[in-house]
Amino acid sequence: MRDLAIARRYAKALLLIGKEDGQTETYREELATVAGLFSSEKELEQAIYNPLYPVEQRQKVLKKIIAKIKLSQVMSSFLNLLFTKRRIIYLNNINEFYQKLADQFKGVERASLLSAIELSSETVDKIRKSLEKMTGKEIVLKKELDPSLIGGVITKIGDLVLDGSIKTQLLNMRESLKRGESV
């Protein structure tokens, strides 16, 4: 829990800097790139995170990565600060919080759309527009397939779940019949 509070604090600080200099999207991309690189390259992650290696060597590796990726000065300073304060291990959590905060700042809400079959782009667009109208925010949909739904869709926006799947309707109908209610 404490780790998440630390990550949130650093993400907020970076967002504030991004708001001041108008670079929130640049920092979003750079942070996601570095976090993704560390996640995909476990040896690299260990070379930075593992305290068994000398601090100077780990810092040299970080500086080489920063130079190779050609990160902005602010992001370079931010990563060096994380390293110096021994917070670099929270990079993935910081990235997750930053992505959410940057979305909120931009007025974007991320949602998932679960369907039994591949939906046409027109259908997805109609669903997205309905969600935008309902929330008053720009919606970015992540599409997923789940054949067990039989038909219909399930949409998740934050804590809100809109379940229009045939599977759920059949389960509800079964429960109603068990209770002796008319359908």
Image (tube, rainbow, N blue to C red):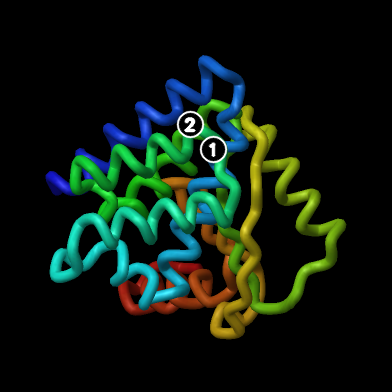
Assess disc 1: are there few (<14), some (14-19) or many (≥20) residues with their C-alpha within 10 Å of its C-alpha.
Answer: many
SS assignment at label 1: helix
Viewer-proximal residue among 138 and 154: 138
Amino acid at dot 1: Tyr
Direction from residue 46 to residue 133 in the image, left or right: right
Residue 81: image quadrant is top left
Task: Determine contact: label 1, label 2, CB under 8 Å.
Answer: yes
**Would you say residue 166 is visible in this rendering?**
yes
Q: Real-space Cα distance between discs 1 and 2? A: 8 Å
Q: Residue at x 25, y 63 (%)?
A: 49
In percent of width and height, residue 173 lies at 47, 73
Question: What amino acid type is highlighted by mark number 2?
Answer: Val
Residue wearing tag 2 = 74
Residue 123: x and y in percent read: 81, 58
The residue under label 1 is 27
Query: Is 24 positioned to the left or the right of 130 in the image?
Result: left
Lateral position of residue 69 relative to residue 63, left or right: right
Q: Residue at x 56, y 37 (%)?
A: 72
Which sits earlier in the primary sequence, circle 1 or circle 2? 1
Determine which of the numbered discs, if any, sits on residue 138 in the image.
none
Query: Quick check: 23 above or below 31?
Result: above
User: Could you say which is closer to the camera, residue 100 or residue 87?
Assistant: 87
Task: Identify the element where label 2 is drawn.
Answer: helix
Mark 2 crowdedness (10 Å alpha carbons): few <14, some 14-19, many ≥20: some
Q: Is residue 103 visible?
A: no
Question: What residue do we see at 56% from left, 51% from top?
Answer: 111
Can you give x and y, in whole percent of width and height, for residue 33 in the image?
54, 55
Residue 19 x, y percent position in the rendering: 52, 20
Residue extending furthest top?
Answer: 20
